Image (spheres, rainbow, N blue to C red):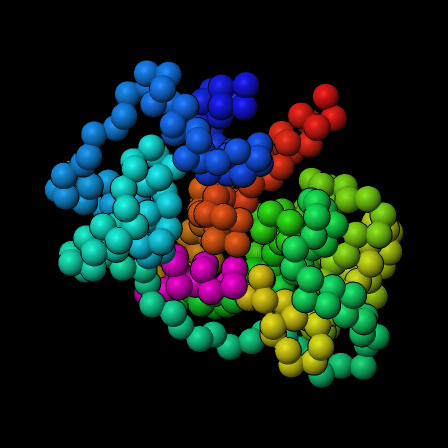
Amino acid sequence: MKYAWIERHRTQWPVSLSCEVLGVSASGYHEHRRRSGRPHPRRLGNDALLVHIRAVHAESRGEYGWPRVWKQLLTQGLRVGKERVRTLMQRHGIRARGKRKFKATTDSNHALPVAPNLLGRDFSPAAPNAAWTSDITYVATDEGWLYLAVILDLFSRQVIGWSMKPHMRQDLVLDALRMAWFRRRPAPGAILHSDRGSQYCAKAFTGALKAYGMRASMSRKGDCWDNAPTESLWGSLKVGRLHGKRFTTRRAAMDEIVDWLTFYNHRRLHSTLGYVSPVQFERAWLAAQERQAA
């Protein structure tokens, strides 16, 4: 029954994730397919495999290195060894964009009240909407700076709220929070973790958290590792998509960022989630909860 369910949904969710959720082995599933007469995929030649590799790499806009390219090929039903993918990509100069350092945007030089660090670097809540994180970054355009604030659900690493404005005032983070709350409606007691920036300490933002029944949590001063998942998100956005691009208008930058956020949530393979996208990970978890309740 479990193998049949995996077979019906293999184009919707990766086989490896379905097997993990259902408590069966991937090798057992493939053996079941073999015994049931399912056709075994033929070995691709290097030229054909290279076409698939280039397609996956292009779809990610050059963001994927060989581990994510290999995982994406597996989800597409191509059974190929990771060393073969790595070697082919290296031979043909196909690689992920290089890493860069970016300056911080936190303004913690203020006298506003600071919340304790309730999160304590526990980045793996057991369910959605238990712990969120938030942060601000910036993008240069010919019209001036564009600032982006996001709300990230730590369970699935999905971006559930965002806001973009030409300034860093408190309504930047307030709008992102409102989007996330109206989309998710977390139960009272959920945590919203951020740095000590003045936007997060402002009365309007802390008042909104209180009205939503959420608890504020803040990183220790000068410690970016206390908000590592959101910092990682900025690296993926800037290195994987924005590096080397010039935007003549803020609108052009906003369109590019929204496109990337859609890609990130729905298609980008996340190493922390077992190389599935945030949306796929959460859908699989919800489907498992429904089966357990049935």
Q: Is residue 116 left or right of residue 69?
A: right
Left or right for 32, reference 109: left
Image quadrant where residue 151 sits: bottom right
Q: Position of residue 274 (x, y in %)?
A: 49, 48
Q: Would you place residue 289 above or below residue 209 in this image? A: above
Q: Is residue 200 visible?
A: no
Relative height, residue 91 to residue 108 (above, below):
above
Question: Residue 236 at x, y = what percent?
Answer: 45, 60
Is residue 234 shown in magenta?
yes
Instruction: Specify the quadrant of the image occupied by residue 121.
Output: bottom right
Count of all numbered marks drawn on residues in the image: 0
In x, y percent, where is residue 177?
71, 53
Read off the magenta span: 232-244
List x then y, in percent, for residue 190.
Answer: 79, 52
Of the pair 223 and 275, the residue shown nearer to us = 275
Q: Nearer the viewer, residue 234 or 170?
A: 234
Q: Is residue 200 left or right of residue 236?
A: right
In the image, is 179 to the left or to the right of 229? right
